[in-house]
Amino acid sequence: MTQAPGLQRRPGDGHEAAGCRRERLVDNQALRTVYEYMTRVDFSRNATVYDRRHGALLGRDDAERLCGAAGLPLAASVLDIGAGTGRVAVPLAERGCAVVAVEPARGMVDELRAKASSDRLAVVIGEGGQLPFRSGTFDAVVIARVLYLASDWRHILREARCVITTDGLLLHEWGNGQPDEPWVQIREQARRLFETAGVHQPFHPGVRSETEVSQELGTLGFVHVSDVLMGPGPQLTLREFLRRLVDGELSYTWDVPKEVQADCLPRLATWCEQGFDLDRPVAIPNQISWTIYRAAHSQP
């Protein structure tokens, strides 16, 4: 692994901010206020099994299709925000891109470093909403399966806008399913039960839909370039999905008190038995897709 490009010191630590004029997009006082209340999902506790659901690495052919659709050169500089265990960062680096992977969860970083063999991949432990890079450092930013996990998702997008070049690319993967998918319906029923029991924001404190992401990017001056369909996600029976939810392998119960789980999860299981064929395998998600955006020349 290599040194991350464009690193800068933050104001207030005795060094200049190296010219990153973030005030055009983010009011610093407002950002500090947001971070006092910001919440996100920390996947350190299940980092060793995370790849079982999401896949260890983006396939080589899929990585080529994504880069080809985006017109991303082999030697492009790429920032992967919320890189997790390196599912996207590692294959992009192996393809020839100079990749910086930013990930806040140390358990995930350990898994990523164990995979990383390319000297074109640097790893930075940090938050996507407080990036330590100069403006215009990267040709492209990757944000994959992240924004629904962080309450500061809008600030993450603003930071991404700051650190890419004037006409840089943003490659976004939603990955959280659509409302008509059975596993999503089970997840949202769990949310309703937990909230009815008095748990505020039991899981996934970030954005609720890909449409909201697209709208926010539009306000930041991004334009839609294309969509890349990768096919269905890994197959799993709904019974196995429910088991993982109940057993705490999935993040949906991590912030829910045990007594609330004891009351709600049996009712969730009954609801699932009545409404679904739990032994039918389903793809999770039904369709893996990426959306490619390009920054306009003028920032809002």
Image (cartoon, grey):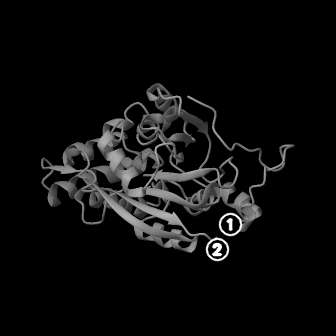
Q: Residue 101 at what x, y percent from top left?
A: 54, 40
Asked if the residue under mark 1 is in contact with the one under mark 2, i.e. CB atoms within 8 Å, the reply is yes
| Foreground pick, 123 / 234 | 123
- Disc 1 crowd, CA 10 A, few/some/many (<14, 14-19, 20+): some
Q: Residue at x 73, y 65 (%)?
A: 27
* Res 69 quadrant in image: bottom left
Q: Amino acid at mark 1?
A: Leu
In this image, 120 relative to 26: left or right? left
Q: Residue 250 at what x, y percent from top left?
A: 37, 44
Give the labeled residue for mark 1.
Answer: 25
Q: Amino acid at mark 2?
A: Pro
Q: Residue at x 59, y 50 (%)?
A: 138
Quadrant of the snapshot with the C terminus: bottom right
**Which of the numbered marks, if any, corresponds to residue 300?**
2
Disc 2 or 1, which lies upstream in sequence? 1
Instruction: Say if 231 sits above or below 247 in the image.
Output: below
Q: Residue 244 at what x, y percent from top left?
A: 30, 41
